Amino acid sequence: MNRIEQVLPPRGGDLVKRHRLSTRIWHWINAVTLLVMLMSGLMIFNAHPHLYWGEYGANFDASWLDIGATRGGDGFLRIGPLRIETTGVLGVWTDPDGVTRTRAFPWWATIPSRYSLADARIWHLAFAWVLALGLLAYLVWSLVNGHVRRDLHIRPSEWKPAHIWHDVKQHARLRFATGAEALRYNVLQKLSYAGVLFVLLPLMIVTGLAMSPGTDAWAPFVTEVFGGRQSARSVHFICAWLLVAFFLVHIVMVLLAGPLNELRAMVTGRYRLPRERPAKDVPA
């Protein structure tokens, strides 16, 4: 490579290095970890498919969410006053042997697939350690190598409503960044990734601790912060589904942006920059 090639910035069509090894390893470990935790968590939820606010919650207490079956054999999801019929998907469904089951989540969505609260807790707690230690290691390393400061820090100009609105419009039009600009996160990506790294994942870990009776022995304030163990369980459940929503949006964006190129970047670290379009509609 000569001196001129070293100075020139990357352009559309160039194959460049995008993701560090630490990012790629954490990404795939985290993907498997969150999937196992979600599926085992749904099995744990099946043991008592109701959510409450406060310290206490049992069958006859007022719940804000229920997934169950009526005496007539219809499945339903209730969130506050809203009730949705879910027969065949939630509450009432048929297992692979053709047997009708009346549990909240179906066999294909849980680990293990047949009812076992004990096994689900083993899976869930084992991978909770992977999640917590992996997140801690990733955050520390990201601070050391400058990933957080360089890629996730939101500059003052990016907080301007005009800038945020411009990015919203670009996403709505499916107009993704091209050339060297594709190597940088836009403000919507920064907000979503920071929300997952610094809000949702830590909340999942803390609320998981708050639900453990053992936490009361060494850090009772953890449960008290959330207003009780049942409130912590509700926040845990909500955060889990917010992570699912993030995952679904993430997959849709990958498919729209070019799945093979995006997948190669997260496996090998190499990414081919999309070719530039004529510059226009630049935010103020």
Image (tube, helix red, strand yellow):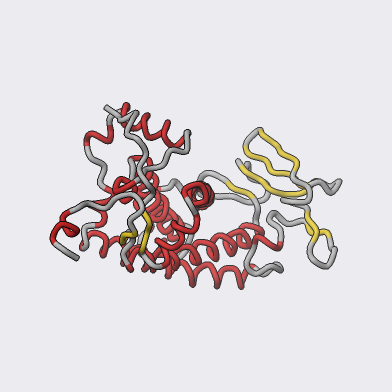
- Tell me: 83 left or right of 42: right
Q: Nearer the viewer, residue 138 or 187?
A: 187
Q: Residue sitting at 49 percent across and 72 percent down?
A: 126
Q: Which residue, as the protein is rendered here, is positioned at the far left?
A: 3
- Tell me: 119 left or right of 182: right
Q: Nearer the viewer, residue 165 or 227?
A: 165
Residue 226, placed above or below residue 101:
above
Q: Is residue 96 visible?
A: yes
| Quadrant in which residue 99 is drawn | bottom right
Q: Residue sitting at 15 percent across and 57 percent down?
A: 4
Q: Nearer the viewer, residue 225 or 252?
A: 252
Q: Residue sitting at 31 percent across and 67 percent down?
A: 137
**Quarter of the figure with the N terminus:** bottom left
Report x, y in % for residue 142.
Answer: 26, 60
**Quarter of the figure with the C terminus:** top left
Q: Residue sitting at 61 percent across and 62 percent down?
A: 44
Q: Is residue 191 visible?
A: no
Residue 171, placed above or below residue 259:
above
Report x, y in % for residue 182.
Answer: 34, 48
Report x, y in % for residue 197.
Answer: 36, 53
Report x, y in % for residue 87.
Answer: 78, 47
